[in-house]
Amino acid sequence: MFSYRHAFHAGSHADILKHLVLIELIHYLQEKPGAITFIDTHAGAGIYNLQDGFAQISKEAQLGIERFATKVMPSFENLLRQVQFENQTGHLSIYPGSPFILARLLRPQDRLKLFELHPKEILILQGNVAQLPNAKQIDVYASNGFSGLKALLPPPGRRGLILIDPAYEDKNDYRLLETTLAEGLQRFATGCFALWYPILPRRESIALVDRLKKVLASYSRPWLQAELRVANVSGERRLQASGMLIVNPPWTLKEKLALALPELKTALAQDNKADFHLSSAEV
Ligand code: SAM
């Protein structure tokens, strides 16, 4: 059950897509002064050392964030700025996970809620969060993010962003994502939900997005879908494509991603099958 460690994947193409979208969502919500509750149901360790054992074994960052060390792309600027903030020596050795991306952007009125279930990962997360200057604004729960989310919804003032980023090592995660989304919308229909998913040649993965879209149709919710493929080699065990489904997306997001995705594709392509997809539905 607990074989997944996100350090293997820190700074990968999938992280880059997810975190780029996450930062856009945070900036959009923060255009208004009202307090926002940010919830990360599957937090991981919070921040990663790319020189550590896990990251060195997988070397996924080499094909991900390290490709941006010498490239300046306008659509990528916000994420790069956060990566640079964690690497003040100028040498890229640290990659922030979603908890640190969120934490660094919190305003004094905002709150951050993090869930992590892995017995080792939670201890690392707690240690990392404790060192943040704004740790008092952050709650870390050593519990199940799928089932724990309900109790936090709707957030105060009904202003919230929920990132659901499961590991999918357990195929129940696909079904749990669907039921968690439905329960979440029942309590907080206007909330912004950002769901990350892997694109894999397995039944649950192929069916997932259509199933999620059925849930969204039943709640009459608008959505935006962004996918990035970096390669298409059959039999490859490493993840070659992933997507984000954003529920109740900001109206500006599609335009931003229409600029960002072609740039990401060019920067992160591993073969000539690299591709992207962007679609949306209004209500
Ligand atoms: N969101 C992180 C980021 O972007 O930096 C990465 C998270 S990683 C994909 C998924 C994490 O969820 C893993 O650390 C795993 O241990 C944890 N996890 C697995 N099942 C969980 C559950 N039911 N509730 C909370 N955390 C869980």
Image: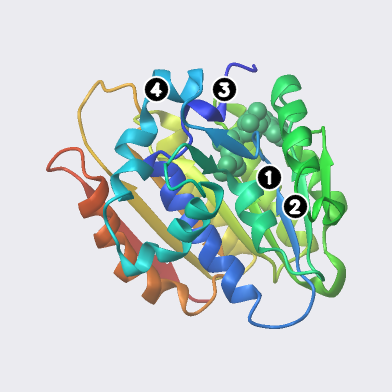
Residue 179: assigned label: 1
Q: How far apart, in angstroms, are the residues tagged by discs 2 and 1?
A: 6 Å
Residue 27: assigned label: none
Please tell me in which quarter of the rendered image ligand 1 is found: top right
Residue 4: assigned label: 3
Residue 74 in percent (x, y) is at 33, 69
Confirm if mark 3 falls within 8 A of ligand 1: yes
Q: Amino acid at mark 4?
A: Ser
**What is the image's colouring?**
rainbow
Question: Callout 3: helix, strand or loop?
Answer: loop
Which of the two discs, 2 and 3, labels the residue nearer the N terminus?
Answer: 3
Q: Amino acid at mark 2?
A: Glu
Query: Marks 1 and 2: in contact by CB < 8 Å?
Result: yes
Q: How far apart, in angstroms, are the residues tagged by discs 4 and 3?
A: 13 Å
Q: How far apart, in angstroms, are the residues tagged by discs 2 and 3?
A: 26 Å
Residues packed near mark 4 inside 10 Å, few (<14), some (14 to 19) or many (20 plus): some
Q: Nearer the viewer, residue 253 or 201?
A: 253
Which of the two discs, 4 and 1, labels the residue nearer the N terminus?
Answer: 4
